Image (cartoon, grey):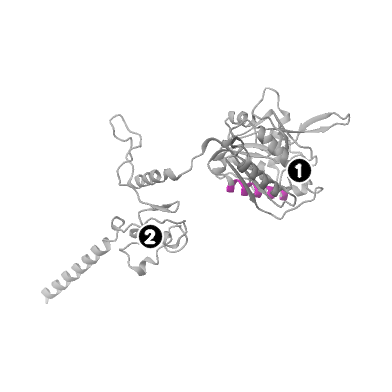
Amino acid sequence: MLIAIVAFALTCTLLVLKGYRQDAAITPSNMTQPQSIGRAVGAEDSWYAKTSAVPEEETSALEPMSGQGGPQPEEHVHAKYIEVLGNNYQPKPAAMPSWLPQTKTGKHRAQLTNESQVILANNRDVAPYTQEPEDDSLLILTPVKNNAQHLARYFALLDKLKYPRSRISLAFLVSDSTDKTQQMLIESRQWYQEQAPPELRFRRFDIYRQDFFYALSRKQRHLREKQKERRMMMARARNYLWTRALENEQWVLWIDGDLEYYPPNIVRDLMAYDKDVIVPNCLVRRRNVQGRWKHSVYDRNAWQETAQSLEMIKKLNETDFLVEGYKSLKTHRRYLDRFPKNETVVPLDGVGGTFTLVKSHVHRSGVGFPAWLFQHQVETEGFAKLAKANGYGVYGLPFYYIRHVTN
């Protein structure tokens, strides 16, 4: 009887060990690698890590690699690839990448984990497919609405810019327009890109249409109580435009569609300051009571906080919205006409959008135009606040002038 019991126990042990060896065979090292997918990301079979070692009924329960909800697969069925740009890239062998910094003895400065080596290998594989910003390339963005009467001047000013035309891309967003703005832009694109001499052709010339079905009469446009909703709508338009149009340009320049004048060399001048965000001082000229022209600051969205303004902000409710240019609301901020002559470049806390030069990495990092209250601001002033909150520098030039048309 004792011999029979011992024999039965040995048989059970052998069966358990055999099953363990079979389970252990399902590992990443011997999985069949998926074939490269030659179509856009989103094809159903490209999202699953299928292996020949997993039974069909178990494979159907695997989680899509996009990270959607549901049960997670067992650790041993993770495929050894990542999905980038619609292709499946297999990692290189576990050898240390040759381009890592080396010591004088030829050995690498630090040993990386296997996981880190795989990450670096994948980065190296995908690098040729990543578009890096091209030096000095410029994307000019202009949202327009019923702007037909100003387009001739807009392009006349562009034609005078002392900047290589081959480095300039244009993009317009037409919203809720009822005049000939869209047709005039289409005709302009056809002339510049198809009929004009090569030296006048832009790198790109794109036109987008996105209607928000928002309209205010001319009398309502500048009412203080309408500014919050109006500026939020403008923020949506700006965000739509830059997220659609920005490719691999190094700089982004926001220009109003109704500027009257700016210097031909302004782009190079502003770039020379090498700031993340920088604006000139936008003026407007009006006749005084004596009939003489007088210049004053047009863009009062460019300002610097003061001790008084910061104290005022502390007393605000979270939902209070601040807007400049109204006698009924004193914010105690410092505008660009309030700086002495020796302060030629000054840090700002708010900017407008009349002529705003931005390094493209600011937008690429996720800094856009808040269509909600951010530190009591929206749109361009909210953009400046958000940029500073993310560590970027925002600056203005009190004595570098451009001019806006008189409304």
Q: Is residue 374 visible?
A: no
Place residue 335 in its image quadrant.
top right
Q: Position of residue 301 (x, y in %)?
A: 70, 38
Q: Position of residue 156 (x, y in %)?
A: 70, 36
Give the residue at x 33% y 42%.
112
The secondary element bearing badge 1 is classed as helix
Q: Residues within 10 Å of mark 1 (few under 14, many from 20)?
A: few
Residue 224 higher or lower than 268, as above or below: below
Q: Which residues are magenta?
A: 229-244
Residue where numbered disc 1 is placed: 149
**For the residue marked with disc 2, what is the amino acid?**
Ala
Does the magenta stretch mainly form a helix, a strand or a loop?
Answer: helix
- Residue sticking out furthest to the bottom: 1
Left or right: 92 with respect to 388? left
The secondary element bearing badge 2 is classed as loop
Give the residue at x 15% y 74%.
5
Measure the C-alpha gap from mark 1 to mark 2.
58 Å
